[in-house]
Image (spheres, coloured by chain):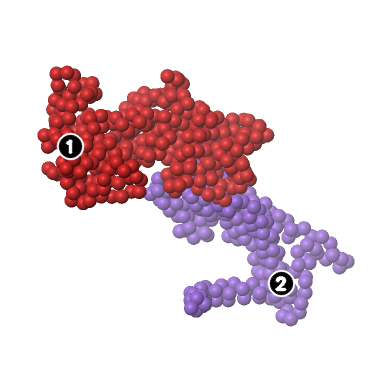
Amino acid sequence: MSEVVISARSVSKIFGSGADKVTALDAVSVDIFQNEFFTMLGPSGCGKTTLLRLIGGFEEASSGKILLEGNELNDLPPYKRPINTVFQSYALFPHLTVRQNITFGLEMQGIDRAKANHRADEMLELVRLAQYGDRVPSQLSGGQQQRIALARALAPAPKVLLLDEPLSALDLKLRKEMQVELKRLQTETGITFVFVTHDQEEALAMSDRIAVMQFGKIQQIGAPREIYDEPTDRFVADFIGDSNFLPGNLVAAANGKHALTLANQHVIELPSVRSGQKTGDVTISIRPERLGLVAENLADQTHLMGSVKSVIYFGTDTTYEIDLGNDQTVKVRTQNGTGAMDDFGRGERVGVHVPADAIRVLVD
Amino acid sequence: MKAMLRSKRFWLIAPAVLYIGFFMAVPLVQMAYVSILERGDYGGVNWGVFSMDAYVSFLFERDLMDNLVLNTDYLQVFARSFGLSAMTTVFALILGFPTAFYISTQPQGRRNFLIFLVTIPFWTNILVRNYAWMLLLRNGGLVDGMLGWIGIETGGLDILYTPYAVSIGLTYTYLPFMVLPIYASLEKLDHRLVEAAFDLGADKRRAMSRVILPLAAPGIAAGCILVFIPCLGAYVTPELLGGGKFMMIANLIGSQFGAARNWPLGAGLGFVLLALVLIAMMVYSLKFKSLPEESR
């Protein structure tokens, strides 16, 4: 494993006092590694921006420590931290030209003008806006301002770049472009990016690791695939992508395997579960795209039987809502154009195929 | 339809236009006319007898041989007024900027209250306030007494009836005109720009000089104009705190219409002042045109 750059040690942040007290961060500990694209993902108010501002030095931790390469940062003001930020609103200086915006941080470090201008041109090249050095920010589009904000923050070659929902103001197409661009910049510069977003798709697309946050705590940390395929709790499974949640009963079998009984007495054998998994009544999650549908006459006792409640066509795929009875429904997403699946109409009886390896037993 | 709407809207501003047109433009023209007439022996003017004497005597006087020689008396009054107004503007800026900055950093409710406090002096008549300053500044007055009480023996402060007293009085009177526009520009300032400056390595001093001051510049300029120009025309404060010994332009003009019984000169001095102010404003507007659109 590469070296730890930023390390938070049971960091808490409490805003206000008395009855108005709000705990924005609750004893969060996390290590962020060199060269990593690290994303903090969660709904608004989950504490992700607070943690970012603590790392940047714009807020003071109520307790706990933040370390940069092993040295405590807590008492350093933002201007003494080798960390730069790309703000949500870009915060470009309106009275300075694009080039002057980029050289601002370099001048503050005492780098002479000629060198700073040279570096600014390199940065403009890097964000592909070489011709725009002499404009002022108000003459640029949102996407261009975004790139300049990136160039400005990258110019002093910080150890860590903080990005506070930098893409949220852009329209969908531009956002997709900038996602690719950000990933490219991170790879090319080799700087550690700490990215804050509430957009799970964005997080999955760009990150090396994701920390999913809720109520001021980190619920799960892992690579995108790990977070998506093996969510540990209901919040993560629900927040990242679509999930079906079903009640079940888990019983340990003699051979180290487990038997899961779903509501309709349908039993599935699970080859492995998380170590220390409690048995008895549990909730399981299954991704809609892992489920399959068969016509009633082809179904056997390995299928969950139900009727089609709704059909929604999305172009690349179709989502069926299947009523299993007992107030339980599951969503099934099938890819179109593969020919593997027949079309099913509303009200039709179908069998739902549940592969054992698609089932995640949640901790709750 | 649109044209009709526009002409209807015109009637909304018509009363104001007529009021200003009549009560400002007409006297202005009248004064311009008076300034190019011959003076009457006992005040007033000789209507219909034109003379440029007023403008000539601004700079020259006739010696015994009836030759024109340079007379800098009036010029000195102008120079003194400009100097004193500039000094007052600087004092007001030094006091006003930190005040405005402090207010702009307070929470919203508190800001409104503080701004309300800034406007309180306007509630009292300017004469009363100037008499109050006389009581404060005179020898043995409150300031003198306080200095003595904390152990500084002044042996008489001797500040009343000096240019300093006038400048202190003017600074006090016009300080709100400095605070309010600067506050307005600082309040609009996006706090995230200051955070961005810190983030990029600027300490407090450099964040102030490189980001806050440039962005507040239009407000500072507006405040300076709002203090400097009324100061040039100040009448009551130099009369009372300067004790009449210290004449500013307005007092000079007043005396020409009064004791000196030289109406054309009084009117002429007024127009010289007007011209100088207009030139200053033009220089200002040219200078600030070069700033980027957004920061204005």
Q: Is residue B213 left or right of residue B264?
A: left
Q: How far across and how far down the image is residue A260, in percent? A: 16, 29
Secondary structure beneath label 2:
helix
User: Would you identify the image quadrant in which residue A317 lies?
Assistant: top left
Residue under label 2 = B35
Q: Chain of mark 2?
A: B
Left or right: residue A293 compared with residue A12:
left
Q: Nearer the viewer, residue B205 or B223?
A: B205
Q: Residues within 10 Å of mark 1 (few under 14, many from 20)?
A: many
In purple, which chain?
B
Q: How many marks?
A: 2
Q: Is residue B129 above or below residue B267?
A: above
The one nearer the camera, A113 or A160, is A160
x then y, percent, for residue B184:
50, 52
- Which residue is pictured at 12% across the width and 37% down the height? A264
Left or right: B176 as drawn, with respect to A348: right
Give the residue number, with chain letter if any, for mark 1. A303
